[in-house]
Amino acid sequence: MPAIAFDFYLPDNLNASHPPERRGVRRDHVKLMVLDRKTGSVRHDQFFNLLDYLNPGDLIVLNNSRTVPAILKAIWFREEALVERNIEIRLARRRDEDIWDALFAAKDVRVGDTLQFSKDLSAVVIEKSNYPLKTILFSKKGTDLFNSIYALGEPIRYEYINQEWNLDYYQTVFASQPGSVEMPSAGRAFSWELLFNLQRKGIQLDFIQLHTGLSYLLDDDLETSPADNVEEYQLSESTLKKISETKMAGGRVIAVGTTVVRALESAGISGELSGVTNLYINNSFPLKMVDGIMTGFHEPKASHLDMLTAFVPQEMLCKAYDSAIKNKYLWHEFGDMNLIL
C-alpha cells in the first residue's frame, strides 16, 4: 500500500538533540499535546498531567522491550585475509537466539565473510537478507550474546543528535526484555511516580513486547515499503482478556507507541499471541483493538504518520502538527508527546 505524502516544514531547532534530563527537564515534564479524535480540538499541557485526560477503567498498554546498543565495530576477514580493521555493523532485527539481520557500513560483504568483535565474540555472514541487510550467525547465543552486545555496542543515533549519550537515556523506566535496536520512545516520558499515580486513579496498565527494527538504512535513495519492516512481538492471553473486558465496560484502550498498535492489531487479526508482523496501518485500516495512542512527534513523510491517520483524518493531523510547531514542541525520541484520544 502506498504511503501518504504528508510533508511539512520542520525547523531544525525543533529536533531534540538532548535528552530532557540534560535540558533540565524531568522525563515526565515534557510537553503534551492532546488531540481530540472527534472534534480535532487541541490542548497543550505537560506530560505529568496525563491523568487529567484519562478515566478510571481506561487501559494503557506499554511496550517493555529494552533497547540494545546496536552499533558494533568489528575486524572484517575473508578466507582469513584481512579486509578492513574497523567496519561498522548495525543490528537490524533478531531472527533467532544467535542470528541477526544487520546493516553493514561497507559494500561487497559476502556470504562466508567473518567478523571479529572481540576476543570471545565473532560472527559469520550466512546469507543476504532483504536488501541491503545481511544475516549473520554469532558465536554466542541468548543471554551470553546480549551480555557481549551490551558490553561492546553503542546506541544508534541519527544526525539530529550531535553527541553520544549513555544507553540509559535510550531506555524506558519499565524496559525489561532486550531486543529493540531503536528505543520504543513513546514510553520514555513515563516515570515510576506517574505510573503509580495512574494506578491510584483506577487506570489499568499492561505490557506487551515488540522489538523495534532499524528504521533507517543509511541510504536516502533506497525506498523501502513499510511492509518490509518486520518486527517480533509477544503478548499474553491475559492482555487480550483485559482489552476485551475494558471495552465491554466502556473503557478506552490507549496504546503507548506505534509499536503497541502494530502488536495489538496484528494479534487481533491473526489470533497469534507471538510472532512477527509487517502490518502496515493507514487511514484505510479499521482499528479494532485500540481507541487512542500516545506517541512522539514524527518527521515529515514518516510512515508512522500514516498510522496516525487511522486515528484522525490527515487534515486534522496537519492542523495539530502546525499548532505543535507554533508552540515549539520538540521532535524525535528525546522530544515531546502527543496523545490522540
Image (cartoon, rainbow, N blue to C red):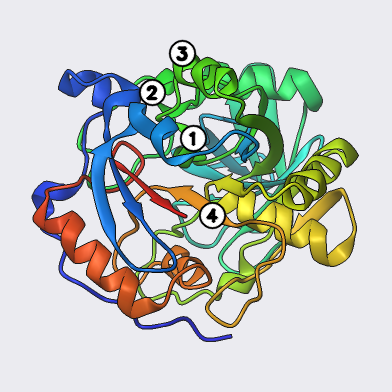
Q: Position of residue 298 (x, y in %)?
A: 35, 57
Tag 4 residue: 292
**Mark nearer the N terminus (1 vs 3):** 1
Residue 187: assigned label? 1
Q: Is residue 125 among what the camera can see?
A: no
- Mark 3 burial class by Cα count in 10 Å: few <14, some 14-19, many 20+: few
Q: Residues within 10 Å of mark 1 (few under 14, many from 20)?
A: many
In this picture, residue 85 sits left or right of residue 332: right
SS label for mark 1: helix
Near mark 2 (Cα within 10 A), the count class, few <14, some 14-19 or many ≥20, is many
Mark 4 vs mark 3: which is more N-terminal?
3
Where 80 falls versus 205 (above or below)?
Answer: below
Residue carrying label 2: 169
Label 4: element kind: strand
Q: Label 3 belongs to which residue?
A: 193
Q: Amino acid at mark 1?
A: Gly
